[in-house]
């Protein structure tokens, strides 16, 4: 673990202990030491638990909140991480790591101006800290770039990248020996060759990549926001969760469960890209199968099929490294046309995130969402991509800092109103690759095993059969991949680690 990533050992400032409190403070320090060990072992859940117990015994210690904030950052609970970092700063204005962690939380949420303010504070206090200076400069660059983009954005609907492409005049060089579309069409032979080509770490020719993107956009534009599918009694569909650029694990799914076909349909439930460093390979393979089997291979949008996430978590950097900025702009356009939800036999609703911040949402409301845009910060489109279930009734503030968390009562009410049996969602890493909550009515499926090469989780996919629609879970473990680390193309700020 890098110096800046270590959970802190020393005691906090806080107020002096009152008589009789010394024992409680000692116990709190012991709990923090246990939490630090769990953190070192990458068991962030237990780290959070023990930091929380330490905080209960000594709520005036800024370092406990700072350490718990870092554990929350590791588990992508950016909302909680932000809250803890803010609390640490309130308790101790001179606690520099609090500013670092609050900045990192805001970066992760795409709140670059807020992050910049905290990096500025760190640089003022520690003018000779190279790491702080680099982060401040990188964040400042992003803020200026965003301001420039806003300044040149016209009120008119932006011109499509497709209009500026001349694919026909792109030549495929004689020395290129990889897969090519057959008279401009994706075939099964092309897909098999492509998968092997990618497995061998070779790059698809840019002309073929552009052909796939332009064609898949034409297919997606014609789809409704809510795709409705009927499974006959004898038919089954495979539902996969997040794949996050883990190409070799995607190939393993096809190895275990069979290649997509008209008799072996798939639904991939968002977050195809970012984090894993083979996102280009994952997404072009998925888009290829979408073109090959448009009615039997389904792709739903995740919260990572968005510009903000792609800018931070690697996909934009990866596309620019392997192709061009223009191609990333086209990917961004295509992502805006991905459907947001899918309903099977009128009984099972699938979406990436989850249910809604308000009661009363109907399937008809989902159908009416205009999806061709970057998602807003709130409302039904945001919720479908971002929300998470919680065990207790009601709703609460999201651990991620976006959308909400919803309880079993919210799930029940939504299902009854819409005459549904249950929902399937993804969006969260689970140790077993799946989780069944809300009395069987809310199912999470996650298909990126050993997420980011460090979580040790299994992956899973679900079979649904038309006869009974009962979910059947299939687990699998991670397979080896070439020595390219996750986040290799992520924003420099995230690669630099978290102080």
Image (cartoon, rainbow, N blue to C red):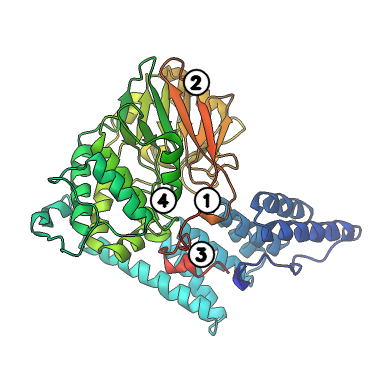
Query: Of tags 2 and 4, which is closer to the observer?
Result: 4
- Mark before the other along the chain sequence, 3 or 2: 3
Residue at mark 1: 451
Give the SS element for disc 2: loop
Whether residue 278 sits left or right of residue 209 in the image: it is right
Residue at mark 4: 247
Badges 2 and 4: C-beta atoms under 8 Å apart? Answer: no
Disc 1/disc 4 C-alpha distance (Å): 12 Å
The quarter of the picture where residue 230 lies is top left
Q: Quarter holding the C terminus?
A: bottom right
Give the SS element for disc 1: helix
- Which residue is pictured at 30% across the width and 44% down the height? 192
Percent position of residue 104, x then y: 51, 63
Outermost residue, left side = 169
Percent position of residue 362, x then y: 38, 24
Whether residue 237 sits left or right of residue 396 in the image: it is left
Task: Give the total of numbered labels.
Answer: 4
- Mark before the other along the chain sequence, 1 or 4: 4
Badges 3 and 2: C-beta atoms under 8 Å apart? Answer: no
Residue at mark 2: 470
Badges 1 and 2: C-beta atoms under 8 Å apart? Answer: no
Disc 3/disc 2 C-alpha distance (Å): 44 Å
Residue 499 in view, yes or no = yes
- Mark before the other along the chain sequence, 2 or 4: 4
């Amino acid at each position: 673990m890098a110096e800046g990533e270590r959970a802190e050992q020393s005691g906090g400032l806080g107020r002096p202990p009152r008589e009789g409190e010394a024992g409680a403070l000692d116990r709190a320090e012991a709990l923090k030491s246990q939490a630090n060990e769990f953190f070192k072992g990458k068991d962030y859940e237990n780290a959070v638990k023990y930091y929380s117990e330490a905080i209960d015994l000594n709520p005036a210690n800024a370092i406990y909140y700072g350490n718990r904030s870092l554990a929350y950052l590791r588990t992508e609970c950016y909302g909680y991480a932000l809250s803890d970092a803010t609390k640490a700063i309130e308790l101790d204005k001179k606690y520099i790591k609090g500013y670092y962690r609050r900045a990192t939380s805001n970066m992760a949420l795409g709140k670059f101006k807020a992050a910049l303010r905290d990096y500025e504070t760190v640089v003022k206090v520690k003018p000779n800290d190279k790491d702080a200076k680099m982060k401040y400069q990188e964040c400042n660059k992003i803020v200026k770039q965003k301001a420039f983009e806003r300044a040149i954005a016209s009120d008119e609907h932006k011109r499509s990248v497709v209009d500026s492409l001349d694919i026909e005049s792109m030549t495929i060089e004689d020395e290129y020996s990889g897969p090519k579309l057959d008279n401009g069409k994706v075939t099964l032979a092309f897909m098999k060759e492509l998968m092997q080509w990618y497995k061998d770490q070779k790059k698809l020719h840019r002309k073929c990549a552009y052909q796939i993107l332009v064609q898949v956009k034409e297919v997606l534009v014609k789809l409704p926001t809510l795709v409705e599918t009927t499974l006959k009694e004898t038919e089954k569909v495979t539902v996969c969760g997040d794949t996050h650029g883990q190409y070799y694990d995607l190939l393993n799914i096809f190895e275990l469960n069979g290649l997509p076909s008209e008799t072996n349909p798939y639904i991939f439930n968002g977050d195809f890209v970012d984090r894993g460093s083979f996102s280009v390979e994952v997404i072009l393979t998925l888009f290829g199968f979408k073109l090959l089997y448009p009615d039997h291979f389904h792709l739903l949008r995740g919260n990572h099929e968005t510009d903000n996430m792609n800018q931070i978590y690697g996909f934009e950097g990866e596309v620019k490294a392997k192709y061009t900025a223009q191609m990333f702009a086209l990917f961004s356009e295509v992502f805006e046309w991905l459907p947001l939800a899918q309903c099977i036999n009128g009984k099972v609703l699938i979406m990436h995130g989850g249910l809604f911040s308000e009661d009363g949402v109907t399937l008809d409301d989902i159908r009416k969402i205009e999806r061709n845009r970057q998602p807003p910060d709130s409302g039904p489109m945001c919720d479908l991509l971002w929300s998470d279930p919680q065990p207790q009734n009601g709703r609460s503030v999201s651990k991620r800092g976006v959308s909400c968390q919803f309880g079993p009562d919210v799930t029940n009410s939504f299902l009854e109103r819409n005459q549904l049996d249950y929902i399937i969602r993804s969006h969260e890493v689970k140790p077993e690759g799946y989780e069944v909550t809300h009395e069987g009515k809310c199912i999470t499926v996650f298909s990126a095993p050993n997420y980011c090469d460090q979580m040790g989780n299994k992956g899973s996919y679900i079979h649904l059969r038309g006869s009974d629609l009962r979910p059947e879970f299939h687990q699998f473990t991670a397979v080896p991949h070439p020595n390219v680390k996750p986040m290799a193309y992520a924003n420099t700020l995230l690669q630099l680690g978290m102080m």
